[in-house]
Amino acid sequence: MGKFDIKSMPQWDYLEKSYNQIKKFHLRDLFKDENRFSEFSIQDDNIGVTFDYSKNIITTDIFKLLIDFAKASNVNEYAKRMFSGEKINWTEKRAVLHTALRNRSNTPVYVDGKDIMPEINSVLLKMETFSNDLRSGRWKGVTGKKITDIVNIGVGGSDLGPKMVCEALKYYSDGPNVYFVSNIDSADIYEVLKRLSPETTLFIIASKTFTTLETITNALTARNWITEKLGDKAIASHFVALTASIKKVLEFGIDKNNIFKFWDFVSGRYSLWSAIGLSIVCSVGFDKFVELLDGAHYIDQHFLNAPYERNIPVIMAVLGFWYNNFFGASTHAILPYSQYLNRFPAYLQQSDMESNGKTINIEGDRVDYDTGPVIWGESGVNGQHSFCQLIHQGTKFIPCDFIGFVNPLEKIGDHHEKLMANYFAQTEALAFGLTKKQVINNLMAMGLSFPDIEFLASHSVFEGNKPTNSILIDKLTPKTLGVLIAIYEHKIFVQGVMWRINSFDQWGVELGKVLANVILPELKSHVDNKHDSSTKNLIGIFNSKKNRDL
Ligand code: F6P
């Protein structure tokens, strides 16, 4: 592939000109068109999803230009290459096949000439058998007791995905309690283990590489905790491993029958569909896990086959690109109006920021445009009572996604209507705001007199024109959760293609790991170190104060 600059694409130029034009308009003006919602929304009754993107700062022409940009970037061709097992992760020379893990049609998928579906299906079967045994009590701890508690030890993709899904599907959980330990800070494992009994606890050690310092340190602590109470023979009934590195697991001492394999073609942050999902399966049962896979598979087909103009991940991606590269938006907020989805923003932080936080393009050159935004958020309505002030009236421009559900899982009083009234109100307020004239009328109606009105009016103005997407789903089920996650996965993929970066490597996490390994011995024995004056002095203070009773 020759040198190529996306800014030299004619669509870039047109979009820049369009940005200068659209700046003069407000969403209030754009909504004078009565057909706006029908033009800029998608309703899919097969999965019970409405995607409303009408409250974005776009016109018909701008939308067409954005879609043209995605077409000119060959998104669909890249997607086909990904789904067919081509090694699109070019820096690690790996295929990217999380889509094969949920390939419910079971059509062959080849990596290096070998169909990988039989192996994927055999691991799924092993997960089914194991989870049935565990949940029914056929699988017992070494003293013959049923396992009541599971601790998943992993970090990054080996933690965030299964933790988010277990939390999201808590309502459906009828299996053992599931805990997650990820931090190397001993507080994490200490606070979990203090409530549990070794006789009834199973550890799932989740690590693709089985070398990650955090995970191996926590796994060793867990192993000591088990063997001190129950002896070495307990390891076989209290530890299982989820990994792509079988040899390292065997060295650690976990029984070979207790290994659930996944593969190099699954990136950590896209791995919840693989054996990494074992904690999910134990919590909600295998059938519900399959429903999750079904939902994601549905979106895989939608992504591959729907025209760009009706393709939800493509549309989300081009809108994000529009704000990121032309409006200068450096962050994007995610607000799920569901307590069950409270880990969703944290999950997306890894999947999006580890994927698209890159500076070097496919030619190995530094890009001269912005790539992945900062992803952040919180469940609504909690966000409204913390950071939403800034989104409404601050100086930053922050596009947001609002995710809501038509039906609650538990109907208690009018909680859900009150929750959803806020969901609808936020996007309306963000889009249309409140003019000074409206503010003055409101204050007058409240009986305020004029000096007070004058004093308060400018503070109470909402400029509006803040773009949002609304994703409104009939109900939170394993299937619709699979749909939602896959939509975001493909959105991230499309943006990576448009920015011409590798969304599937993560070299940026390496340097910190290397330096931590250099520093660790310096904290254990007071050796002279060769760091910069700041790091050197901080380490010196740490070493001189540690173990002192402060
Ligand atoms: O944070 C870096 C990373 O490599 C992630 O990409 C990955 O999800 C995480 O560490 C955990 O890696 P592993 O599963 O190999 O322990």
Image (tube, grey):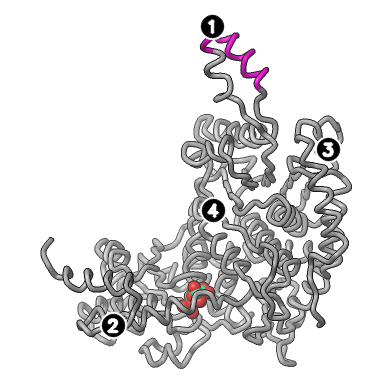
At label 1, the amino acid type is Ser
At label 4, the amino acid type is Trp
How far apart marks 4 and 3 lie (CA) works out to 28 Å
Q: Which mark is residue 449?
A: 1
How far apart marks 4 and 2 lie (CA) works out to 37 Å
Magenta region includes residue 453 = no
Hey, which quadrant is residue 533 in on the image?
bottom left
The answer to whether residue 128 of the structure is visible from this angle is no
Q: Which mark is residue 529?
A: 2
Label 4 vs label 3, nearer the camera? 4
Hey, which quadrant is residue 299 in on the image?
bottom right
Seen at 35% across and 75% down, the residue is 532
Seen at 56% across and 82% down, the residue is 262
- Is 84 drawn above or below residue 315 in the view shown? below
Secondary structure category for the residue under label 4: strand
N-term-proximal mark, 2 vs 3: 3
N-term-proximal mark, 1 vs 2: 1
- Is 435 drawn above or below residue 291 in the view shown? above
The residue wearing badge 4 is 376
Seen at 32% across and 80% down, the residue is 519
The residue wearing badge 3 is 36
Query: Which stretch did the figure color magenta?
Result: 436-452
At label 3, the amino acid type is Arg
Q: Position of residue 465 (x, y in %)?
A: 70, 37
The answer to whether residue 548 of the structure is visible from this angle is yes
Secondary structure category for the residue under label 2: loop
Q: State yes or no: Cβ of the residue under disc 4 lies below 8 Å from any atom of ligand 1.
A: no
